[in-house]
Image (cartoon, rainbow, N blue to C red):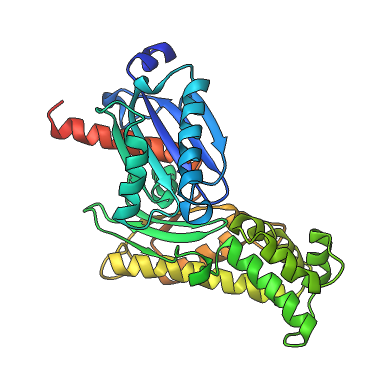
Amino acid sequence: MGSESDCRSEGVILGVDGGTTSTICVCMPLLPFSDHRQLPEPLPILGRAVAGCSNYNSVGENAARGTLEQVMAEALSKAGLNHSAVRAVCLGVSGVNHPTDQEMILNWIRDIFPGHVKILVENDAVAALASGTMGKLHGCVLIAGTGCIAYGFREDGREARAAGAGPVLGDWGSGYGIAAQGLTAVVRAHDGRGPKTMLTNCVLKSLNLSSPDEIIGWTYADSSWARIAALVPVVVSCAEAGDQIANDILNNAVQELATSVKAVVHRLQLAGEDENGSFPVVVVGGVLEANKSWDIGKEVINSILKTYPGASPIRPKVEPAIGAALFAWNTLVKEAKENGH
């Protein structure tokens, strides 16, 4: 493919994965368009940077904008480059749910780069899907981390989503949703509305609290999504130890997540009219990673396969930020072909 310095001279691509917990940016060389079917392994990464939350719904517009600017500048700095070297940027950011969200973030970023730079602003689901399909938008992606969303794309450009509206509007398959149900179970057990649960002692120990009465104060002192979602491992460990309430919470999460994927697949007819066709399902996020005996991701996939046997589950080998960069690169390749280059 040529030396790394050759790649730098052709320009670079930035891929950003902006989540509710952290934001990652990778800087990749612009790969030769003629090689677009033969991606090098491993993919060359010139710089990588990590920053905080960039979901403006969670931290506000100013903080989100600052995080995005910071993480891109740091990735370029680590690559020994500046903004003038950039040919394309794809920002996959959680909280981008409407064209007005895209326009807002585009306005933040537009003046940072030269006018010829291709800038794509998408939901972080695009970056996650592209990480499993190496930059192509086809199939369905399920993200379940602090938040959750199912997003599907057809090759004709149609797309659909399910869930992803945040904890207030019922993303109960998310890390926040699982943890919030765990906290709720402790409060209900304490005041007599619900059965006793192992979660009580485990949550109190995890939070270094002495009584369930203190949970209310702890929760509202800082109700940021990531802080609540950090309690997911406590719920999982209680379920693995045989606690029925914790087990019910995880089973509910499995059904919520699988239903979200099925809704998207059905709306887009990704499996064809007979619902037996093949399509990729990319699964990403900490909630879907295997634990000792409770594997939420495996249970979700099994549920999807019962309805859509042609689904092809993919656990990506590269992170979503690289998926975002590959999507930006694929977009440049497509435009070059359309322009006869």
- The residue most toward the left is 340
What residue is at 85 percent from the left and 71 percent from the top?
Answer: 211
Most distant residue in the bottom direction: 193
Residue 340 to residue 299: above or below? above
Residue 10 rendering spot, x and y as whole percentages:
32, 17
Where residue 215 sits, quadrant-wise, is bottom right
For the N terminus, the quadrant is top left
In the rendered structure, the answer to whether residue 99 lies left or right of residue 176 reads left
Q: Quadrant of the C terminus?
A: top left
Is any atom of residue 42 visible in this view?
no
User: Residue at the location (35% across, 65% down)?
Assistant: 265
* Rendered location of residue 268, percent (x, y): 29, 64
The image shows residue 323 at horizontal and vertical percentages of 42, 40
Q: Residue at x 26, y 25 (%)?
A: 34
Residue 49 image-quadrant placement: top right
Relative side of 14 to 229, left or right: left
Q: How many marks on residues?
A: 0
Please provide percent x and percent y for residue 340: 12, 28
Q: Nearer the viewer, residue 282 or 176?
A: 176
Judged from this view, the residue extending furthest toward the front is 62
Image height check: is 335 above or below 238?
above
Where is 69 relative to 197, above or below? above
Picture residue at 49% right of the left edge, 20% below the top: 79
Q: Nearer the viewer, residue 153 or 200?
A: 200
Q: In screen coordinates, is 84 left or right of 167?
A: left
Residue 315 seen in render:
yes
Q: Is residue 75 left or right of residue 89?
A: right
